[in-house]
Each structure stands twice: as structure tokens, then as C-alpha cells.
Amino acid sequence: MAARMTALAVNSTDPAALAAWWAEVLGYEVQDTGEDGVVTIGLPGQEPKGAQPVLDFVPVPDPTPGRRRLHIDLNATDRSQAEELQRLLALGATPVDVGQGPLTEQMTWHVLADPEGNEFCLLASTVTPLSGGAPRT
């Protein structure tokens, strides 16, 4: 028997705003806003603990110091990597240099940051969208 990831926690100084940003990027919707301030987003209509992990945005008073230990990898579902990169930049993502160097055949990802500086990668390959998770344009 194996474990399956059901959620990814992201520390945030403004969970509602950051959850809304990631919901727009991923085509997700807000599924829950807890009394503790945690905002959960996931695929539209997905049941709890469904096929696609949710993102939980957890309120913290200050950003995590130093480099992040965990990040999200994204793959475009309906466009090329270059087109998706332009969409993410237009939504407010910023390029980040973590020492990865320029794109090569061996290193085919872009390192970006969301509006609060959380790093994520945009990978070169495209994937089939899951039911209910069609990207918004």
C-alpha cells in the first residue's frame, strides 16, 4: 500500500489573496475557508481527498526565511510552455534565479515566484487536464 498526496500546504501572509491567485493560475476554486484562516483551493466540483491534491494556504505572520523547501511544479495543459509562461507572467508571476542557469535540453523548466515570493516551476511537457480542471483564460 502506498500513500497519496491529498494537499500541499503553502505558508502565506495573505492566504485569501494568494489562494485567489493560485486558483486563477490552476483553474481551481476556493473549496473552504477555515476559522483558523486556512484557505483551501481545488478542482471545481472535486470531493474532499479527490484525485487531484488541494492547496491549503496557511496564515503565517512572516514569510519563511531562506530558500523554500517545497515548491509546486506546473505543466501546461492546453498550450505550449512559452505561451503558458506568458500567461503566468501576465498574472503576476516573476522569474527567479536560483542558480539554474539558462534553459538547455537537459534543463527545460522556468523557475518563477508567485506574488508572495513562493517559488514554483513551469515544466516543458504538457499534460492532459483532469476533469473539471480546464484552465481559465
Image (cartoon, grey):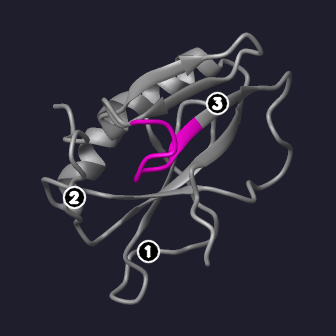
Residue 91 visible, this angle? no
Task: Determine whether 30 is above or below 9 in the image.
Answer: above
Task: State which mark lies toward you, 2 or 3.
Answer: 3
The amino acid type found where label 3 is placed reads: Phe
- Placement of the N terminus among the 4 image quadrants: bottom right
Sequence-first disc among 1 and 2: 2
Which segment did they paint magenta?
47-55
In front of the other: 95 or 43: 43
Label placed on residue 56: none
Q: Residues within 10 Å of mark 3 (few under 14, many from 20)?
A: many
Discs 1/2, front = 2
Q: Which residue is mark 2?
A: 82
Q: Residues within 10 Å of mark 2 (few under 14, many from 20)?
A: few
Direction from residue 97 to residue 48 in the image, left or right: left
Number of the label disc, if any, that sits on residue 102? 1
Looking at the rendered image, the disc whose residue lies closer to the viewer, 1 or 3, is: 3
